[in-house]
Image (tube, grey):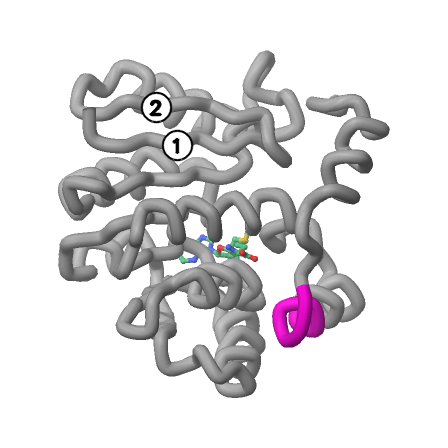
Amino acid sequence: MDLVDPRIENYALAHTSPFAGLLAEAAGQTREEMPSPGMMTAVPEGRLLQALIKLSGARRVLEVGTFTGVGALLMAEALPDDGELITIERDEGHAAIARGHFADSPLGDRITLIEGDAREEIERVPPPLDLVYIDAWKPDYEHYYGAAVPLLSPRGVIVADNVLLSGSVLDAGDNDSARGIVAFNERVQADERVHNVLLTVGDGLMLAWRA
Ligand SMILES: C[S@@+](CC[C@H](N)C(=O)[O-])C[C@H]1O[C@@H](n2cnc3c(N)ncnc32)[C@H](O)[C@@H]1O
């Protein structure tokens, strides 16, 4: 299902800053070489994440699900000089590619890649976190969320990607990913500790911050 008329989507993309430099190279390599390049954070979501980091003055950011490192690179770019980006990836191959990009980047020293299962690793990340970007295994979104909320700084925000899952949230049936996302969206909506907004950007972005 197209969430937004593709003509509008193209128009919006044409009026959004494109990736440049190493970010564009890493994104291009991901498109050419990875079997599922659609997993990569796209330009609109990426630029929105950067805006949130800049505008909130975020200093410590956690990404759940690194893939080839594009999201980590773009968020690191928006951080201040003393900023820190922690990213968790359980797939060895993805982690190796991301490490290569981080090594090539002058911002690589802002990035810490943790290799392991985010279900467990997230519990070991020290607070406070100013932004948590949830972008890994869809059935586990509720778990990541439950672990992330107590780690948030007072100005902290959680951003979760793919919360419309191409519209499958309207009829999840026995699709585990869609069911996981529906449960996550309902959990956030019912959580009195946060205020939240579900944006129809990309495949759907949920933003949640302390109420
Ligand atoms: C959608 S991609 C992430 C895209 C990335 N955030 C970006 O900006 O390009 C999801 C990634 O999460 C990883 N992943 C899935 N389940 C995970 C888990 N439980 N722990 C850590 N990584 C996981 C996958 O291997 C995959 O690389």
Mark 2 touching mark 1, by CB under 8 A? Answer: yes
Rendered-image quadrant of the C terminus: top left
Report the magenta residues as a range: 20-26
Q: How crowded is mark 2: few (under 14 residues within 10 Å), some or many (20 or more)?
A: many
Residue 207's tag is 1
Direction from residue 76 to residue 158 in the image, left or right = left
Decide which of tag 2 and tag 1 comes sooner along the chain.
2
Q: In the rendered image, which residue does mark 2 sit on? A: 196
Secondary element type, mark 1: strand
Does the numbered disc 2 mark a residue whose Cβ is under 8 Å from ligand 1? no
- List x then y, in percent, for residue 26: 65, 71
In percent of the image, x 52 and y 44: which residue is there? 48
Main SS of residues in magenta: helix
Q: Does the magenta stretch include residue 171?
A: no
- Residue at (47%, 23%) from the top-left corner? 198
Q: What residue type is labelled 1?
A: Leu
Q: Around disc 1, counting alpha carbons within 10 Å, would you say few (fewer than 14), some (14 to 19), or many (20 or more)?
A: many
Residue 22, image x and y in percent? 63, 75
| Relative to 34, residue 137 above or below | above
Foreground residue among 78 and 164: 78
Nearer to me, 201 or 1: 201
Q: Residue 40 carries which label?
A: none
Picture coordinates of residue 12, whole percent (x, y):
73, 35
Most distant residue in the right direction? 7
Q: Which quadrant of the figure contains the N terminus?
A: top right
Q: Identify the residue shown where x is 15% and y is 40%.
A: 154
Q: State how far apart marks 2 and 1 are (Cα).
A: 5 Å
28 vs 52, nearest the viewer = 52
**As shown in the figure, which amino acid type bears the numbered disc 2?**
Asn
Helix or strand or loop: what does disc 2 sit on?
A: strand
Residue 20 in percent (x, y) is at: 68, 67
